[in-house]
Amino acid sequence: MFKEEMLKGRAIFITGGGTGLGKSMALRLAGLGAQLFVVGRREEPLRETCEEIRRAGGAAGYAICDVRDYDAVESAASAAVRQFGRIDTLINCAAGNFMARTEKLSPNAFNAVVGIVLNGTFHCTQVFGQRWIAAKQPGNILNIVTTYAAANCGSGFVVPSACAKAGVLAMTTSLAVEWAKYRIRLNAIAPGPFPTEGAWSRLMPSKQFEEHAIEKHPMKRFGRHEELANLAAFLLSDMAEYINGECVVIDGAQWLRGAGEFNDLLVLSESAWEAMEAARVKK
Ligand code: HXC
Ligand code: NAP
């Protein structure tokens, strides 16, 4: 569906690009011709991502950067612009999350997650937004949120993340309107469960819980990284030029499964349905 050089000429700055879904997006977008600048706190995964991109013939660079630190984001943005001449696309993918009973959380625990997800996204958005506006240059921003933000329902046991991701979604829709006149567009992707070391180690309590999650899933499987990376490629491409302020859920209908009042009827067997249908009194 995608032309090989669909993103040729694009220079993308991605936070959290050294691991998990960020890395998968970075590799895919580089494969479509974009130059990639990846940031995160640990050097090793960033270096590995860049090496993989270069081995495949692409262009990549990285900077160690904690997105909670505005000055560090400024420096990383300058390094990226020095390397590629410009950055035209930002993907806010860095996140922090963990399961906890909210009444046990310390203020620092709440701040750690909100600092990465909400403040970090604002820092990167502001740094590039200001540069693009000053240079009269168009820009493209993609924010990775979660279904519990998109569905406007929140989620117990991940309250700092739910609050922060909802904030990121509000930032996406607000700025899509405010900055459209500068030809800056913003969209979001809300992934359901996609296995990654980062998420699974913090949010999948046991093998049993994982099996339960698959069993309850309407499609009986988790997401595949290439499915999300392809969606990101489309949303960032010129084919999606008129899509602005949108949040696309990619979860195989997982959150809808939990929302519909009668969806638990999925567990009824064929014979149970047949017995009910046979017992129905015809008027
Ligand atoms: C309660 C916790 C905690 C936990 C940390 N804290 N883990 N509290 N339960 N499990 C508290 C600490 O005690 C401390 O508070 C405060 O949080 C800060 O902890 P640090 O370890 O000093 O923070 P830091 O090194 O900045 O690390 C941030 C982090 C960590 C968020 C805590 O997990 C991290 O680096 N995460 C990055 C990667 C990540 O989370 N990936 C998953 C994304 S998945 P005190 O008061 O003791 O000082 C995702 C998708 C969800 O978002 C949907 C899946 C389907
Ligand atoms: P992940 O591999 O843990 O990704 C998180 C990334 O953020 C890491 O590369 C991490 O690198 C970086 N990061 C964390 N704190 C940072 C900070 N302060 N400054 C800079 N970078 C920081 O987990 P993932 O599952 O791929 O998650 C990627 C995105 O998808 C996140 O936004 C997450 O909320 C979202 N998501 C994932 C799922 C899922 O099922 N996997 C579902 C819904 C949404 P360092 O630790 O080196 O800094």
Image (tube, helix red, strand yellow):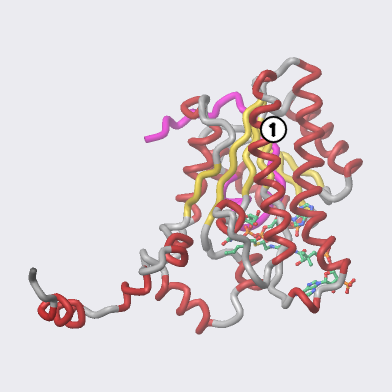
Q: For mark 1, what is the residue?
A: 175
Where are the magenta residues, as a range?
1-25
Q: Position of residue 166 (x, y in %)?
A: 67, 52
Residue drawn at x 75%, y 46% is 39
Callout 1: SS? helix
Q: Nearer the viewer, residue 21 or 215?
A: 215
* 87 magenta-colored: no
Q: Residue furthest front?
A: 283
Q: Is residue 218 above or below residue 244?
A: below
Mark 1 near ligand 2 (CB under 8 Å)?
no
Locate residue 24 relative to residue 78 in the image: left or right: left
Q: Quadrant of ligand 1?
A: bottom right
Q: Tag 1: Cα neighbours inside 10 Å, few (<14), some, or many (≥20)?
A: some
Q: Nearer the viewer, residue 71 or 189?
A: 189
Amino acid of disc 1: Leu
Residue drawn at x 71%, y 49% is 167
* 16 magenta-colored: yes
Residue drawn at x 57%, y 51% is 150
Q: Residue furthest top?
A: 136
Q: Nearer the viewer, residue 112 or 157?
A: 157
Q: Looking at the rendering, which quadrant does residue 173 occupy?
A: top right
Q: Position of residue 188 (x, y in %)?
A: 59, 43
Label count reads 1
